[in-house]
Amino acid sequence: MSFAALLKFAQQTDAKWQRHRHPENRSVLVDSRTAMNYAIVAPLHRMMRADHRVQFYFTASEMPQACTAIYREAGAAARLITPQRAALMKFDAYLTADQLWVKLPRGTRRIQMFHGVAGKYGHIYDTPARSMREWHRLFFINQRRLNNYLRSGAIDADSPAAQLIGMPKLDCLLDGSLSRKALLESYGFDPARQTVLYAPTWSPYSSVNALGLELIERLCQAGYAVIVKLHDRSQDTRFIHSGGVNWRERIKPILEKYGGHLAQSGDACPYLAAADVLITDHSSVGFEYLLLDRPVIRIEMPELIARTNIHQDYVQLLAEAASSVRNVEQTLAAVEQAFAAPREKSSARQHVAQELFYQPGTATVRAVKALYEVMELELLHQIHLRVS
């Protein structure tokens, strides 16, 4: 018997023994690279808290030292564990929203949830150049990416792993749980003010590197309530992520001077719900904001597109739904125009949102149901009522 066959037999025996000892108990391991990764999984975690048969554990396999910061919004009771401890445990499911793969010798069912739709590093995330058959489930956000996986040969046409789920993180934008008024007041803003959110992507070639500081100051000087949401990775001072700059420390004094707000949460949704207009370059947040059908301004960054391997299809989709600009002056003019004519490009925004997000508003329900099926566990009654 080969080593692989022997390992599989041992894993199956272990799983059967665990089910025999604790037939109703299940454990889930969440692995994240950033707080934004956890934000993707968080709606499932919250919905399933009522089920005491299921225990969630959290790890950061790439940066164990950052585990506490990554899961700061998971709650004080979150079970944080090292990758080494995780390797000794048996998990019924492994959830991640990035290309992470912690070693779990006792076996598990691995679920990929994805963390964006902007098409960056397409050969890794959107149209993989290698097989993705090692995943037991792929929770696709849209049909487009599922088709790309099939076209590239990353999965088989009849693969049970492929499941069209949507993006659970975004359900809150449509279910009425976020109040613009309450959010703005919590940020110290008068809800009557015109609010602009600047949310650039991460990269040395991001708009924040090229013109971010000037843009933020000029927006503040123009009298807007300004929120800046940095990508988690743009706060990493390694050159590949931020160009070697601590952008939080550079931006913070400007916002403090003018009474702006520097976003703290890894989840962009509350800031999206609070804003009247979004400015970005090429980020998943730019597409996510389309679900609110509010104006988007896109700063053209050609080198960013080229260096991060973004397919032109995604560039064209965002350009179709947004107003495109190239410098600070054009951006300020576009913001004025957005407030003067907020319905402009509305039909395009709705079209692109429909293209990129499968049945938004109900994705968490589908994801939770699929997770219970993977764990071979019946839905708890309270949860069953929510997913029925």
Image (cartoon, helix red, strand yellow):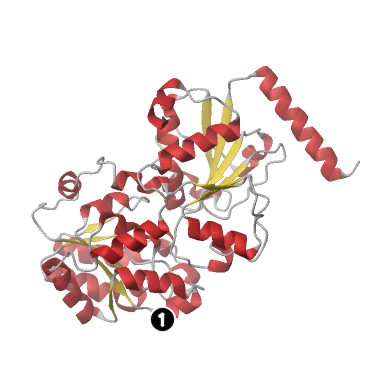
Q: Does residue 246 appear to the left or right of 346 in the view shown? A: right
Query: Which residue is at a point 44% across and 62% down the rendered structure image?
Result: 236
Counting from the top left corner in percent of width and height, residue 159 is at 64, 49
Q: Does residue 2 appear to the left or right of 42 in the view shown? A: right
Could you tell me which quadrant the N terminus lies in? top right
The quadrant in which residue 319 appears is: bottom left
The residue that disc 1 covers is 302
- How many numbered discs, if any? 1
Query: Which residue is at a point 61% across and 59% down the rendered structure image?
Result: 150
Counting from the top left corner in percent of width and height, residue 338 is at 17, 69
Residue 129 vertical placement versus 64 (above, below): below
Mark 1 secondary-structure assignment: helix
The quadrant in which residue 287 appears is: bottom left
Could you tell me which quadrant the C terminus lies in? top left
Residue 56 vertical placement versus 378 (above, below): below
Q: Name the residue nearer the viewer: 86 or 351.
A: 351
Counting from the top left corner in percent of width and height, residue 128 is at 60, 63
Query: Which residue is at a point 61% across and 46% down the rendered structure image?
Result: 161
Q: Residue furthest right?
A: 1
Q: Name the residue nearer the viewer: 74 or 279.
A: 279
Residue 189 vertical placement versus 199 (above, below): above
Tag 1: residue type? Pro
Q: Does residue 379 appear to the left or right of 93 in the view shown? A: left
Q: Decide if residue 375 is in sight here.
A: yes
Q: Name the residue nearer the viewer: 113 or 329.
A: 113
The quadrant in which residue 251 appears is: bottom left
Q: Does residue 342 appear to the left or right of 25 in the view shown? A: left
Q: Name the residue nearer the viewer: 133 or 142.
A: 142
Q: Decide if residue 244 is in sight here.
A: no
Counting from the top left corner in percent of width and height, residue 340 is at 11, 69
Label 1 Cα crowd, 10 Å radius (few <14 / some 14-19 / many 20+): few
